[in-house]
Image: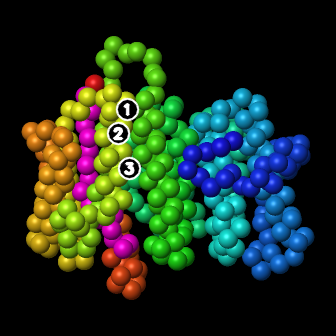
Amino acid sequence: MTLPHTRSTLSRALLATALLSALAGPAAAQQTRLNPQEKRITDEAIHADLQGYEATQGRIQALNDAGRPVRDYHLSKAQCWLDVSFHEYTRNDRSAFPQEALTESEKLIVAMETGVSPIPTDTPLVNNAKYLRDDLWQRLKAIHGTPGFSCAQQAVACGEVELVHAGNEFNQQQWRHSKPYIQIAEDLVNDAEAMARQCAVAPAAAAPTPGPLIANVLFEFDRDGRKDIRTYSLESIDRALATLAGEQRELAGVTLVGHADRMQGKGFDYNQGLSQRRAQTVRELLIGRGIAADRIRYEYRGDTQQVQQCDGVKPRAALLECLLPNRRVEVRFELAR
């Protein structure tokens, strides 16, 4: 099974032997216990742990062989928990994260094997992972229960797990190590929203209005000009415009919401003006890309909606980089029916 935007599912060696491990049956691995870090110093200990991973992978494969689709939310989530557990195990993560992530995978596997219905959709912050990027969590939450969820469930499940993975890395080594997994989560959220919009659903008397395309334009600290935008964040606008064209969607309008980080002091009037100027800059940028001015509206929130707290991050340069997602203009491309 291949999942989008994840590291390769376990490794080629594990995938090659996983089916053999499945023969042990569901009860064999319902509570796989990895060796503590201090005992992972012998080939025997490591081999025993790898056998546990192989057996768990085999059970996921067996569920798929029995007819549960690869894109199923719970099967995907079990796979992604297994993937992040194995990823951190191979990186010698000394915390409880590999074990707790593996346990979450097994909980879902047991529920699927025993026919539990409904299976919970909550996503625990294992190993006391930091809750990062509330905006991404909310975008994923909004897809649950919609008609398009049936097409997006794999990306939603893995996006949720990657946000937990990022929060665990943040606790251990702060923003520098969590950043790659935040990027994976962002990509999965964008993919999930696109899949939900494109999902073929049965015609209804009144087709629902598709959800918006969302992009975030990020600014350097205390800056608001065109040259102060992180170049890669402009790609999110270009991707959204390409999606509009590719899906042949009609644009109903664009809403811009300007934001600032808390570094100038929370509630400081200066941040209101800064977030307004950033929204105005992005408005001019969109006009330059061919969007009619009368279709663009903007508002600004100052520092009132921080999506990343970065408590305890030091030194200052690291803190400023961690707070980057707060220095944003959220661009919402509203789609017509």
Q: Earlier in the sequence, mark 1 or mark 3?
A: 3
Q: Can the viewer see residue 302? A: no
Residue 20 in view (yes/no): yes
Q: How far apart in space, not on screen, are marks 2 and 3 (Cα)?
A: 24 Å
Q: Disc 2 residue type? A: Ala
Give the x, y percent position of residue 218: 29, 62
Residue at the (33%, 27%) spot, across then down: 248
Whole-percent x and y of residue 180? 50, 64
Magenta range:
321-336
Find numbered disc 1 in the image and state the secondary structure of the residue it sits on: helix
Assess whether residue 240 is covered by the magenta stretch: no
Q: Is mark 1 in CB contact (under 8 Å) with mark 3?
A: no
- Give residue 315's quadrant in the image: bottom left
Residue 246's label in the rendered image is 1
What residue does disc 2 label?
242
Cα–Cα gap, marks 2 and 1: 6 Å
- In the rendered structure, which disc, 2 or 3, sits on the residue that comes first in sequence? 3
| Horizontal relation, residue 48 to residue 282: left or right | right
Q: What secondary structure is found at the residue carrying circle 2?
A: helix
Q: Is residue 248 above or below residue 227?
A: above
Residue 235 percent across, percent down from the top left: 35, 52
Residue 265: % across, % down:
20, 77
Rendered residue at 78%/56% (across/down): 53
Q: Amino acid at mark 3?
A: Gln
Does 333 appear in magenta? yes
Residue 254 picture quarter: top left
Q: Which mark is residue 138?
A: 3
Q: In the rendered structure, are the residues bearing label 2 and label 1 in contact, judged by CB atoms less than 8 Å apart?
A: yes
Residue found 28% across the figure and 57% down from its top: 217
Mark 2 vs mark 3, foreground winner is: 2
Helix, strand or loop at label 3? It is: helix
Callout 2: few (<14), some (14-19), or many (20+) C-alpha neighbours within 10 Å? few
